[in-house]
Amino acid sequence: MGSDGGLRVDAAVAGGLTRVAQAAGTLEQRGYDCCWTAEINHDPFLPLVLAAEHTTRIELGTSIAVAFARNPMTVANIGWDLQEFSSGRFILGLGSQVQAHIEKRFSMPWGQPVNRMREFVLALQAIWSCWRDGTKLSFEGDFYTHKIMTPMFTPDPQSHPFPKVFVAAVGEAMTEMCGEVADGVLAHAFTTKRYFEQVTIPALMRGIKRSGRQRGEFQLSAPIFVVTGDTEEQLTTASAATRKQIAFYGSTPAYRTVLELHGWGDLHTELHRLSLQGEWDAMGALIDDEMLEAFAVVAPLDTVASKIRERCDGVIDRVLVGFPSSVTEDTVIALLGEIRGQPVRSRP
């Protein structure tokens, strides 16, 4: 939860550097709590420099930056600088990606992703401790070794705490690791409330217990598919688009376990077959109303905020939502307040 114990409401900003400053400023004005960038077809860190320069309150995070395309030292430098430049508002969100992309797109080694990610986070903490406290850098693991740090390469001290480190996780092992060594977990949109309650939360609590912390010291962040609109036509259009998104993720082997929990394992086989043939429209048609409502909040504008809050209640600490472009700014501001269950904050 946030420092006030309430639900935080975040948003993503996409695209290149030319639009991020204005987009981040708009998100801050509307009252969002965090602006997230993703490593898809643009670098995830550079936009946050501009976002930090043009905002004063909103948190700024990567969701995600691909950890295994980099090493802990380079990421530690970026995180340290962004934390200072943003006056302590940066959240470092990391993800493992999958083997094919790490080896064939990034030309980097792959293996034991959970253990490797755990070591990556611990290495970051060791490097930052060296810079802040002056302790000798002596980190040696199975995947990363950092033993040299001279004054020339040590950044100037700063008054802000270390950046929070969130890690993307779907499976139990990665989720449990997050609870042990990270500050938060970045759940995937292809997750149902049942999966959260039966798989994610128990795994998370095992890790948190091992770390000696309490649940309130940790944040679970999750994007949610939102199907909404003022008219039946808008709801139908939004539903069709969301069915295709759900079908796309459902065709991916890494997410089959989510479908299996609901007894929909056979659906993955068919979706995967159709994906290999490029039958995207046919895939979306396989997502029935029960599946749609398991993965998405489906409601008209006048009740969508309460439905989002209901989906998050007792499970999610910060939710990433987006609304159709047809929704007015005043309506978005009102919805944010309703989702939090409190009046929206005043604009800066």
Image (cartoon, rainbow, N blue to C red):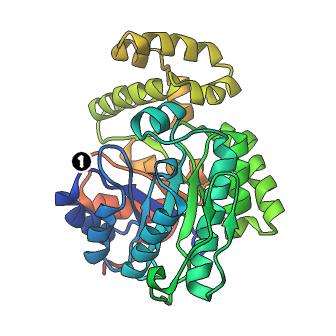
Question: Horizontal and vertical percent for residue 328?
Answer: 24, 56
Question: Horizontal and vertical percent for residue 214?
Answer: 77, 68
Please say whether residue 1 is visible from this viewpoint: no
Which quadrant would the N terminus be assigned to in this image? bottom right
Q: How many marks?
A: 1
- In the depicted structure, whether residue 148 falls above or below residue 202: below
> Residue placed at 61% from the left, 25% from the top?
256
* 174 or 289: nearer the viewer: 174
Please say whether residue 177 is visible from this viewpoint: yes
Question: Horizontal and vertical percent for residue 288?
Answer: 50, 19
* 312 or 304: nearer the viewer: 312
> Residue placed at 45% from the left, 84% from the top?
152
Residue named by callout 1:
325
Left or right of residue 123: residue 243: left
Q: Secondary structure at mark 1?
A: loop
> Residue placed at 22% from the left, 66% from the top?
21
Left or right of residue 128: residue 80: left
Label 1 neighbourhood size at 10 Å, few (<14), some (14-19), many (20+)? few
> Residue placed at 32% from the left, 53% from the top?
43
Mark 1: amino acid: Ser
Q: Of all residues shown, which one is farthest toward the left?
A: 18
Which quadrant would the C terminus be assigned to in this image? bottom left
Question: Horizontal and vertical percent for residue 284?
Answer: 41, 19
Asked which quadrant contains residue 130, the reply is: bottom right
